[in-house]
Image (cartoon, helix red, strand yellow):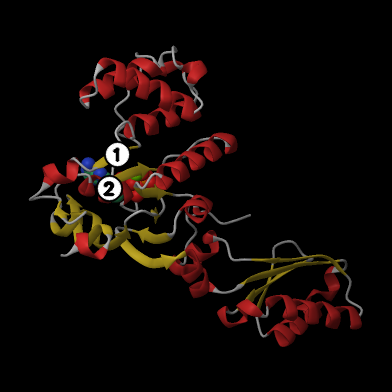
Amino acid sequence: MSTQASGLAVETAGLVKTFGETKAVDGVDLAVPAGTVYGLLGPNGAGKTTTVKMLATLLRPDGGEAHVFGHDVVREADEVRGRVSLTGQYASVDEDLTGTENLVLLGRLLGYGKKAARDRAGQLLETFGLTDAAAKQVKHYSGGMRRRIDIAASILSTPDLLFLDEPTTGLDPRSRNQVWDIVRAVVAQGTTVLLTTQYLDEADQLASRIAVIDKGRVIAEGTKGELKASVGAGSVHLRLRNPDQRPEAQQMLRTVMAAEVQLEPDPVALTARLAAEAIDTAADQSARALGELARAGITVDSFSLGQPSLDEVFLALTGHDTKDEVAA
Ligand SMILES: Nc1ncnc2c1ncn2[C@@H]1O[C@H](COP(=O)(O)OP(=O)(O)OP(=O)(O)O)[C@@H](O)[C@H]1O
Ligand SMILES: [Mg+2]
């Protein structure tokens, strides 16, 4: 595979990993362009961590091939290790050490001199908003601080490829935003990021391309726009004043918008799903529909036109919710 020449940071073909009866990774093909954030999106047990571990040379594939910057992860594992860094469930920070101590220690392990290690540690702690916590033991950090020190540790020496395995799982919105900013900064420095996430909005925020993975297989791949286009142009949500008028409204919307119209559990709510071809005319169609409803004496209390969420994308692709729960 001519990964180097093709500008790919990661290229896999038919990657397989089996644990006993479980096909954790079942023939995964990936092509991750260098210099981008690539999202590996999937629910619990989809095979995200297993894929990342094979790419990071921590697990040996049972089948297929994987190259990182042109290097085979099995035959050229040392070259691969020299260019990647992993954070997530396998971060190397020591809970009993302070933030500074951790970063200095890791810097020394990476071959920095004493002063250079201290300088780099100070710089990273500042960048990551951890200066005030620099002298605290990591075990006393909050979840968000912990995640930031994990990422700081993994970019002590700027890796060419950084694996971020669910970097914001369990974080509050503010901490998530901080981690997202860090990821953007890391990419701006030229590092490629392979991000695994269960959060559709996270992939949407950060990734240029997304592979949706379910039960060890890639079920869809493309830019965010492509994924959304494969599902539809979005939805129009309406709430009526009078629930008795809902069947009539449903019929009208079907005709005017040429859309599939669903009745929601809320007796006054309905949703029209727009076809992909309607992506440019959605606003016009909505305006026409509202006009028709008004003429028929149907009062609309609220109206919104929304782009499809990645949740809807996942539902459309897999036929089940990302968390196998029924949305309220
Ligand atoms: N060491 C192991 N031994 C046995 N089974 C494993 C092992 N590691 C993973 N699995 C199984 O392989 C499948 C994929 O797991 P993996 O951890 O890759 O999923 P994931 O997408 O990272 O999920 P999560 O979002 O929960 O982290 C799961 O069914 C899991 O139980
Ligand atoms: Mg995982």
Q: Could you tell me the amino acid type at mark 1?
A: Leu
Task: Please rate how many residues cluster around mark 1, counting C-alpha atoms within 10 Å: few if below 14, some from 14 to 19, many from 20.
Answer: many
Numbered circles on residues, count: 2
**Residue 171 location (% of width, % of height):** 52, 35
Where residue 38 sits, quadrant-wise, is bottom left
Secondary structure of the residue carrying numbered label 1: strand
In the picture shown, does residue 229 fall above or below 18? below
Question: Could you say which is closer to the camera, residue 120 or residue 177?
Answer: 120
Give the residue at the far bottom of this rendering. Answer: 255
Per the image, the residue denoted by label 2 is: 52
- Residue at image position (31%, 38%) is 158
Q: CA distance from mark 1 to mark 2?
A: 9 Å
**Residue 290 location (% of width, % of height):** 82, 77
Answer yes or no: is residue 59 visible: no
Say the numbered circle drawn on residue 124.
none
In the picture shown, does residue 157 fall above or below 327? above
- Residue at image position (59%, 66%) is 308
Answer yes or no: is residue 246 visible: yes
| Disc number lying in front (1 or 2) | 1
Q: Could you tell me the amino acid type at mark 2?
A: Val
Per the image, the residue denoted by label 1 is: 86
Asked whether the beta carbons under mark 1 and mark 2 sit within 8 Å of each other, the answer is: yes
**Residue 247 location (% of width, % of height):** 78, 78
